[in-house]
Image (tube, rainbow, N blue to C red):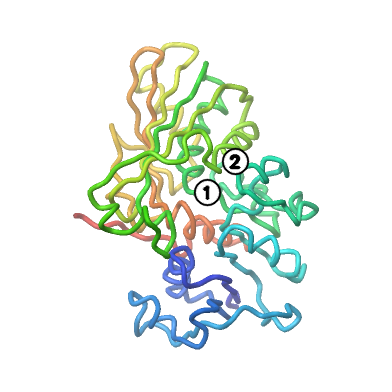
Amino acid sequence: MKLRIGIFGGSGYGGAELLRILLARADVEIAFVTANEHAGKFVGEVHRNLYGLTALRFVAAPEEFESLPDVDCVFLALPHGQALEIAPCLPSSVKVIDLSGDFRLNDAREFLEHYGREHTAIELQGEFVYGLTETNRGEIKRARLISNPGCFATATLLGLAPLVARGVLSGRVIVDAKTGSSGSGAKASANTHHPQRMNSFYAYKPFTHQHVPEIEQELRSVGEWAGEFVLMTHSLPVARGIFASIYCETKDELTTEAVRALYEEYYRESFFVRIVQGSPDINWVKTTNFCDLGFAVRGRSLVVFSAIDNLVKGAAGQAVQNMNLMFGLDERAGLMLFGSNP
């Protein structure tokens, strides 16, 4: 039996990646995909990489959710704020995976501070499970509602989780993270316009990035975490990929071999986390669902390098990985996406 899937917000990069992944699966049927400004158009007209591969057309989002087609699972790949309005209206029989930041933060005050609006569905917040697959697998399997992590949060948390879980850190953690332009969405803005971005490099949202409270919240769920956390985000002149350098101090001196053994043990059942020698490269993970982790160690100083594709492991791929778990499927189903060389 095929899973019937609905996608709200299919015209953006996240929605496009969901379509690219799910259209290739024989066990999935996409019942509908919304894009109000493209309603009536074939998916392949809007996403030219999918041209000729599907007869699916975009539809307008329904005004009354009683008329929603019968589906097993809905993905919300919408701008921040829209899932707050839609999620409470969906039938309780439908599983929901939200790719926005609307249900990531448990504290309504922090949500207001970092997203600039009131949380209008806080009563539903407690039912959402945070969807970082590798650290929350058991809860995800039992969940009906999933809040998919942010892209910077995914790269950072996967890099830090083994260290926090084993209690080896001491003092401040500083994350220097860089992202490609697709992280800003499909609609161009002053800083994502190609002539501005292609030869440029700059920091943005210092100390105020919305993923900071999300990361701090989830570090506390992984282990005992009360340290200072600093995230500095930068705009990288590439289309896809996140590369994070995570600077840590450990309680005791460690060797590279000891750190590697710690990570290999922690991620022993996590196919999509790869431990590499030295530094990873975003070219190795582009268009895939992998997170590549590497290290540099000197005494008590440890740098963890984390590389992901911001649109796949940082968004749509992880969302599908979570869907697989929610329906008792192989976690890797539909996600054996190979990178390219070069």
Q: How crowded is mark 2: few (under 14 residues within 10 Å), some or many (20 or more)?
A: many
Could you say which is closer to the camera, residue 231 or residue 51? 231
Identify the image quadrant of residue 182.
Answer: bottom left
**In the rendered image, the vertical position of residue 312 relative to residue 21, given as above or below:** above
| Element at label 2 | helix
Tags 1 and 2 in contact by the CB under 8 Å rule? yes
**In the rendering, at what x and y percent does residue 340 appear?**
25, 57
Q: Quadrant of the C terminus?
A: bottom left
Disc with the residue nearer the chain's start (1 vs 2):
1
Mark 1 residue type:
Gly
Residue under numbered circle 1: 150
Q: Is residue 128 left or right of residue 214?
A: right
Task: Kindly identify which numbered label has been placed on residue 214.
Answer: 2
**Vertically, is 53 above or below 196?**
below
For residue 266, side relative to residue 118 (left or right): left
The percent coordinates of residue 137 (x first, y second) are 60, 47
Local SS, label 1: loop
